[in-house]
Amino acid sequence: MRLTRRDRLFLFAPLAVLLTGWLGLPALLGLFATFSTYSPFATSIHFAGLSNYLSVIEDRQFGAAVRNITIFTVVAVPLELAIGFGVAYLLRRPIRGRGLLRLLLLLPWLVSPIANGVMWHFLLVGAHSILDFAGGWLAQSSIVSPIGDARLALPTIIAVEIWREAPFVAFLLLPGLLAVPAELWEHATLDGASWIEQVFTVALPSLRPLLLAITMLLVGLSLGTFDSVLILTGGGPGSASVTPALYSYNQAFVINNWPAGAASAWLIALAVLGVGLFYINLAKRSVTR
Amino acid sequence: MSRYPARTLVIAVGVGLLAAACNASNSTSTGNFSGTTIRIVTFTGPQIAEPLQRRGPDFEKATGAKVQVITVPFSDLYQKILTDFSTKTNSYDAMVFDPQWMGDYVPSGYLEDLTNRVQNDTALQWNDIAPFFRDFSATFKGKVYTVPLDGDFQMVYYRTDLLQKDGLQPPATWDDYISIAKHFQGKDLNGDGKADFGSCWAMKRSAQSYWMFISVAAAFLQSQGTKQGSFFDTSNMQPLMNNAGTAAALDIYKQLSKLGPPDQLNNDVGDSRGLFVTGRCALSLDWGDIGPLAVDKSQSKVADQVGAVILPGSKKVLDRASGQLVDCNSTICPYAVNGVNHSPFAAFGGWSGAINKAAPAKTKDAAFAFLSYMSQPAQSSVDVTIGKTGFNPYRTSHFTNLGPWTASGMSEKAAKDYLGAIQASLQSPNMVLDMRIPQTAFYQQTALDTALAQFLAGELSANQTMAQITNQWNSKTDELGRQSQLDAYKSSLSVTK
């Protein structure tokens, strides 16, 4: 049955209403705020041109945040994909308890980022942390928490994020791997392909569109990294782990500089939009081929 | 600030209810408010909201007024209240908030002037409230706008057993503090065979560490009484952040970052409190919270081994004319004790109740009666002994009446030690008022906090740190208007000339 134009409008209308009211309008208001001196309690509002964007871009803290998130994304996303793919690949053959394992893969993702941050904070910091116990086992007085060390704070946050995202990647990739026709695996085996050749000749080509979509999803999520950093380090020590989203939050909700908070949020949104456009372009190319 | 539950909650609640029942019948601030609902907003808590919610039904029984406590996350509280005022929504009749925000709320005319009410309410016993909280914390430009419910100021906590054993006196100066911290750093302080720490502080970025730094710096920056101020020169609004006094404070701060747990740069107050009450630190700096926590034997290993003293001071203070440190004398440091200038810092200022000026008259009366009821000694003397309330002592009677403290589980000696430090701080004419000007959050939570975090992490030198703070403060002051900011600063200090 073909949907008529009227059917499509009818089906899309509820979503359009929701998105317009709860996403579109606030986003537009935020965009207008970036060109003004707006705040909810300002007695007068003036046009500010691009000054809010300039002040954000010129702020060294924002520069540090962009540097950190670039490192974060470049390191975390490939590792999440690699680990996620590896786990999914191991689970593609029927094994006992695979259903339960698939469910367990979702657990880190289901833990809210704030709860995740609190949990890792307790695991890594303080008199009752897992590091403290480990220190006791190893007869050390204490092991320095990596999130208190400027050199290790960002790598630790990356590791915590990988812990959360990689199983989710495996969960998403597993159905794709299971959908690969059995003949393809059999042909590769008969041709004497090693497991690594099977990965490159069978698995990855079959998963390409799915991998592309997941990669874009992970990049978008990485660019917006906020909650776990807020709880774990607050952006410190120094500027070692500040991210653009945390910077935006601090501007808007700590010092009540809404235009700067909105401007930095829109810069993040532009970066995510760029990733989205890149994805659409790549996806179109895949279809054309 | 952040509070923890005390194991004596149930007993104390019972005592409180009994006291409330007795008091309600003879309070002059209660009346018949049947049919009135007081919508009072504060932060999610459970601290601060807990005593309001717990005592609301008692108040309703006594007066007929229903108390509806609305809670929002701390990060949203300032904006929620301000938005409610500015849009004239007026969905809150009263608010329990950070008195630092008076700098934004009072000049706009949003808060009810409570001057006459507090003076005419005998049950409130206004003069029992310590002079600093009465005359500075609750007051803006000479008028009273809030009823104090909490007395926040910082003190130094020390392990009495350790200092006594090694023949050491509690620190009187910051040099003493460093020396004691060095003495104990790396020694086993709780008998678990592991090396422990000389001092434990909260130094995490985007948390509460900047208040700790001000506690150090104030000893060098303010010596002539509260009205002198610690943040700006009251003649021209120039920041007091680039001089020999701040440099000395930064040096101490840096040393302390290395005389504690190795991950101290990421410790918030919850972490430093946990370390102290588990016996891993010889010294700490905190609000009044460690006192009730230390007696809670379910989590404390140092019950009855904790003493408290007024914030350490300095024998040298800043000469504002030259920007250099000079020796204390009776002219420069009129309130010095044994030649040491102490500047106890009322960090945050203590949760306080205020009333929306636009609320209906009867609701305002009921709201004031409720705030008065919460502050009256019968209620507050119990609430300040319960860690879960988040309230710390702020009345003279809170430290002269030991009964509620010993009932809470504190030994008489521990109570005397703890309250002695509170008394010394409360009675100091040189107590430091926290910043209370428009956009205080930018000055402290962004400019100061970020620069300090960068300094501790080695990203900035001391000179760069002072220059960065000064430049950012000056830029913000010029952006908002130097004269209006100066007027607000002087108003907060009740400086009339």
Image (tube, grey):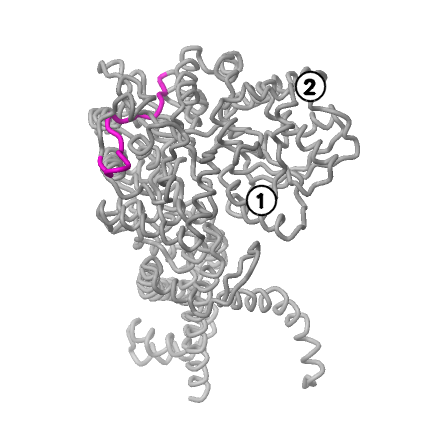
What percent of the width, then of the height, locates residue B181?
A: 24, 27
Q: Nearer the viewer, mark 1 or mark 2?
A: 2
Residue placed at 48% from the left, 65% from the top? A34
Q: Which chain carries label 2?
A: B
Residue occupied by mark 2:
B27
Secondary structure beneath dot 2 equals loop
Magenta segment includes A193: no
- Which residues lie in the magenta part? B305-324
Q: Is residue B194 visible?
A: no
Secondary structure beneath dot 1 equals strand
Tell me: residue A173, above or below residue B346: below
Which mark identifies residue B72? 1
What percent of the width, then of the height, locates residue B31?
A: 75, 25
Which amino acid, mark 1? Answer: Val
Q: In this view, does B268 lie to the left or right of B14?
A: left
Q: State which quarter of the image contains the C terminus of chain B.
A: top left
